[in-house]
Every structure is written in C-alpha cells, then in structure tokens.
Image (cartoon, grey):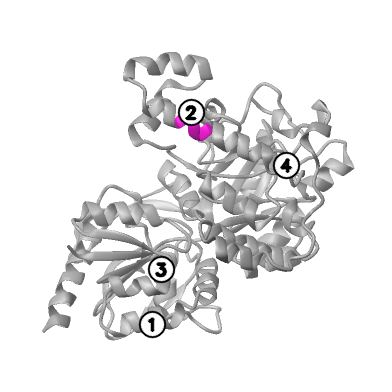
C-alpha cells in the first residue's frame, strides 16, 4: 500500500490522515525526520507557518525535507504548507523550503472574519470543488514551470510543479477527497518513475 | 459566490491551531516574543489573569489600543477577551478585526444568565467549560472552539486536569450509550440533545478543545495534551516566570512532543523559577473564576 506522511509538528494533521485513508493509501504522522524514509509522499498541512518553521528548524527537519523533495518524492502543501514550499514570500527576507518557483503572500485575503468558502473548478480534479479558505495565502506570481490549477477572483489558489502540489485552501476540511486522491495518483506515478 | 463566517470556516480556524500554544500577552513586545517562540496565536489582554486577580475590581475588555498594537506587531492570529454576555464588547472586537473572541470567565461577567449568541457573529468564539454539559451548551450557542476553564491565574494545574478528565470521561460514556439513553443523559447534563447525538456519532467533540487555566510548566502542557487536549492556552505561566523566552519555547516544544519524556526533561533544565502558584483550597469561593458562567 502507498504510504503518505503528514508532517505532524502542528496543525490539521488528523484531517489529512483521514482523507489519505479515504483515498485508499496509508496515512502516517511524521514527527521525526527519520520517518521520512518510510514514506512515498508527504503532505505539509495547514497550521501556522511561522510555528511550523520554528519546529522544523528545532528538530533539524529542514535539510531532510528539501532532500525528500529533491529525490523526486511528491509533496503536497495546503495553506501554511503552500507557504513552506514557495520560493519567495512577500515581506519576508528569506522563504522556507523553496521547492516551488512561485511568490506567495501570507494572509492575502485578510484576517479571520474575511475567511470564506467558495466553489471552484480545479484543473484535473473537479469542476465544483468546495474550497475552504482560512486566513489563506495566495500565489502572486507563478514561474514558467508552474501549472496553475485553480484561480479565485484572479488570485492563483492551487498549482503544480512536477511532483509538487499546493493549495491555498483546505481540502482536508470537507468530505470531498478528490484533491487528496489527485495527490495519491501523483505519488503512484512517481513511484513508477523512481522504480524505473 | 463565497460565504463568510460559516461553521466550517470558524471551526476550521481552530483546527489549524491544533498541537499549538496560545499565549497571553499585554503588549507588542510580548507578542513578538511569543511569535518568535512558536506560539500559534496570542491573546491580547490588558493584564494577565494573575494580575487581574491581584488587582481585584471589575475586569473588562482590554483597551482597543493594546489589541491594535498587538495586531500590528505579529502575523499570527490575535485573540481577545470579551466579558460573558457582553454583546457590545464582542461586536467591537469583531469590528476591529480580531481573529477569535474568548467569551471569558477571567473577566467579570456582564450577564449572569445569558451567554452571547455566538452563531450571530462572523468572527469565531472560544468558550470555557468544566464538563460536557457546559461544553455542549456553548457549542449550541455557536462556539467554534472550547477550552477547559481550569482556574486561571493560579499556576495550579489541578482544576484544568479535573475539567479535562470530566469532559473526556463523559464523552466516553456517551459513545458507549445506546441511542435511547441519550435524552436522559441530555437532561442530566443540561445539554442540547442534538449536539450530544453529533458527538456520539463522530466519537469526539465537533470542535477543537484546548486546555487552559493553570498551565505553568512544560510538563503541565504535556500532561494536558496527554489527557486529550488539542492544544494549550498559557496565561500567566509565561510572562510571570523568571525567564519568559525560555519558558515560552520550552512549553511549545513540550506541547509538540508531549510523549517524548526524555526531551521534556531536557528542555525543563535550568528554566528558572515558574510563576508562583496558588493552592486552590485557599481561594475564597468569590475568587473562583471557573464558577462564572454556567
């Protein structure tokens, strides 16, 4: 069975695990970097990106996560996870993992009272996906190799670059598992590629 | 078409805070220290609970200047407290753009009978609870997050433990019941029937439940996580300790790795003195904050 990890330092970890299981893969909570060796793909969940980054540094996860991505293993970042993947963060001198060629803005839709749900078409995933945005970021600029998967009010809110996937919204907060299933398929494909 | 302030958006915001520590702060400097230490949110206050206790008199919503100062200082979510039943304080905080409102027993209640009808607001609310009845009444009114009440400003974990154990044991009891027993349980607890049914079906509360009211050390935080808390609020415990920066960092780490005892031992070394605590038995009944609200 395909094993997909969820970085379990802080945030909506359980919801992603449930969604992974519902999509027919095994979900594993990753609390120590050694566990990365056991898994075929990784989800960086929603939460507070500043908190997660501090814990990533504290537990020496940083290089291990970058190496995991560079090996060709798929990573899916939602909300705070999207911020961690970005090459550039508006207003921050240094971004985090810098695995995707994009510039992102934190809390780009405003504070909590501006948080919302909206129905979105997502290329390759669904025409009517109920997307939940919570103090969400968006992608301000996407590089050439980045495929835009969803746009809301002219803001890019989901994208893919090779084996990296990200969304500004929280697919794990609804019972619609199509976005997670899309990622599971990406992991399957990468396993075939890495094996050949 | 987009929908603001839905249950999913309000409860979801609390889901993102799970496994984290929310810290009380009284100015921008403390807020920045909390953010640096890895807090998932800060609670902007005029005084921390132990100082509210010491000061006596009526405790109200913080001066908006302080809340604004904290909101401008950090990028993590900012919470603020309104008095129980004080509809206007809550509306003012909502208008200011605060991310979460705590309808809190730490402040002097404005209404001894009614809590705020929280479903009316776009901003989410967190409320205190001592047992499953109180927890579900608050959910029924529209609270999007819960926390145990504990006994705020005492640095004594015993009440937080009592409340968390009570909530968890009543949930276990409910899950084990047959459907025809639930209405009687609802009557005993004074709980909304439909909320109990939802909990029974899900096997857990429909909202996140943090621990609060007495967390003073990294081991206290880890203890609450082990008893089933989704995260912890630390009020006076950080900025009333000898070394707030060290305490803040250590409590964040202990919350993340609450089952790694070796690590908790390591981070607990040389922290200096924790806040001075209060023995619960010495508190006069009128000084028990947990008995405010129902």
Q: CA distance from mark 1 to mark 2?
A: 44 Å
- Mark 1–mark 4 distance (CA, rounded to whole Å): 42 Å
- Which residue is drawn at the image coordinates 52% and 61% (left, top)? B260
Which chain is disc 2 placed on? Answer: B
**Same-chain check, marks 1 and 4:** no
Q: Secondary structure at mark 4?
A: loop
| Camera-side mark, 4 or 2 | 2
Image location (x, y in percent) of residue B11: 46, 45
Inspect this view and state whether residue B28 appears: no
Mark 4 crowdedness (10 Å alpha carbons): few <14, some 14-19, many ≥20? many
Question: How far from the left and from the top, in percent, is residue B101?
Answer: 61, 45
The residue closer to the viewer here, B197 or A90, is: B197
State the extent of the magenta-drawn residues as a range: B167-171
Q: Quadrant of the N terminus of chain A?
A: bottom left
Residue A160 vertical position relative to residue B274 in the rendered view, above or below: below
Where does label 4 land, which residue?
Answer: B152
Q: Is residue B215 left or right of residue B282?
A: left
Q: CA distance from mark 3 to mark 4?
A: 34 Å
Between marks 3 and 2 in the image, the one whose residue lies nearer the viewer: 2
* A92 drawn magenta: no
What mark, if any, has residue A66 been given in the picture?
1
Q: Quick one: label 3 or label 1, which is nearer the N terminus?
A: 1
Q: Nearer the viewer, residue B71 or B151?
A: B151
Tag 1 and tag 2 share a subunit: no
- Label disc, if present, on residue B170 of the rendered structure: 2
- Crowding at label 2, few (<14), some or many (≥20) Cα neighbours within 10 Å? some
The answer as to whether the residues below labels 3 and 4 share one chain is no
The one nearer the camera, B172 or A51, is: B172
Q: Which mark is residue A110?
A: none
Q: Which residue is mark 3?
A: A81
Q: Is residue B67 left or right of residue A56?
A: right
């Amino acid at each position: 069975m395909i094993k997909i990890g969820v970085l379990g330092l802080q945030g909506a970890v359980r919801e992603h695990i449930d969604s992974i299981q519902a999509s027919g893969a095994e979900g594993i909570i990753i609390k120590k970097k050694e566990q990365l060796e056991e898994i075929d793909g990784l989800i960086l969940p929603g939460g507070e990106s500043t908190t997660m980054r501090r814990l990533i540094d504290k537990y020496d996860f940083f290089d291990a996560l970058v190496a995991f991505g560079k090996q060709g293993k798929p990573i899916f970042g939602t909300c705070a996870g999207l911020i961690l993947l970005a090459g550039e963060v508006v207003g921050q001198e240094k971004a985090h993992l810098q695995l995707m060629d994009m510039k992102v803005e934190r809390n780009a839709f405003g504070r909590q009272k501006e948080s919302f749900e909206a129905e979105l078409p997502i290329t390759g995933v669904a025409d009517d996906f109920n997307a939940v945005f919570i103090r969400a970021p968006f992608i301000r600029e996407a590089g050439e190799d980045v495929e835009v998967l969803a746009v809301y009010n002219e803001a890019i809110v989901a994208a893919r670059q090779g084996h990296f996937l990200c969304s500004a919204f929280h697919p794990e907060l609804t019972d619609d598992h199509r976005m997670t299933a899309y990622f599971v398929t990406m992991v399957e494909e990468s396993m075939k590629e890495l094996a050949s | 078409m987009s929908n603001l302030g839905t249950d999913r958006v309000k409860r979801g915001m609390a889901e993102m805070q799970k496994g984290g520590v929310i810290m009380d702060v009284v100015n921008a400097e403390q807020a920045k220290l909390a953010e640096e230490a890895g807090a998932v949110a800060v609670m902007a206050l005029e005084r921390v609970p132990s100082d509210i206790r010491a000061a006596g008199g009526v405790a109200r919503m913080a001066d908006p200047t302080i809340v604004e100062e904290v909101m401008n200082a950090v990028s993590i979510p900012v919470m603020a407290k309104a008095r129980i039943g004080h509809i206007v304080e809550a509306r003012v905080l909502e208008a200011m753009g605060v991310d979460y409102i705590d309808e809190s027993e730490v402040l002097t209640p404005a209404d001894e009978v009614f809590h705020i009808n929280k479903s009316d607001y776009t901003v989410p609310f967190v409320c205190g609870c001592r047992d499953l009845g109180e927890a579900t009444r608050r959910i029924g009114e529209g609270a999007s997050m819960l926390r145990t009440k504990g006994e705020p400003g005492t640095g004594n974990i015993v009440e937080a433990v009592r409340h968390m154990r009570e909530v968890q044991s009543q949930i276990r009891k409910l899950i084990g019941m047959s459907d025809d027993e639930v209405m009687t349980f609802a009557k005993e607890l004074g709980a909304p029937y439909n909320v109990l049914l939802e909990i029974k079906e899900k096997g857990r509360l429909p909202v996140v439940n943090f621990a609060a009211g007495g967390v003073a050390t990294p081991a206290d935080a880890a203890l609450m996580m082990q008893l089933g808390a989704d995260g912890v609020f630390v009020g006076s415990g950080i900025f009333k300790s000898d070394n707030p920066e060290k305490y803040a960092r250590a409590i964040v780490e202990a919350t993340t790795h609450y089952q790694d005892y070796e690590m908790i031992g390591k981070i607990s070394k040389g922290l200096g003195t924790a806040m001075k605590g209060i023995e619960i038995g010495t508190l006069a009944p009128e000084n028990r904050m947990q008995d405010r609200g129902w």
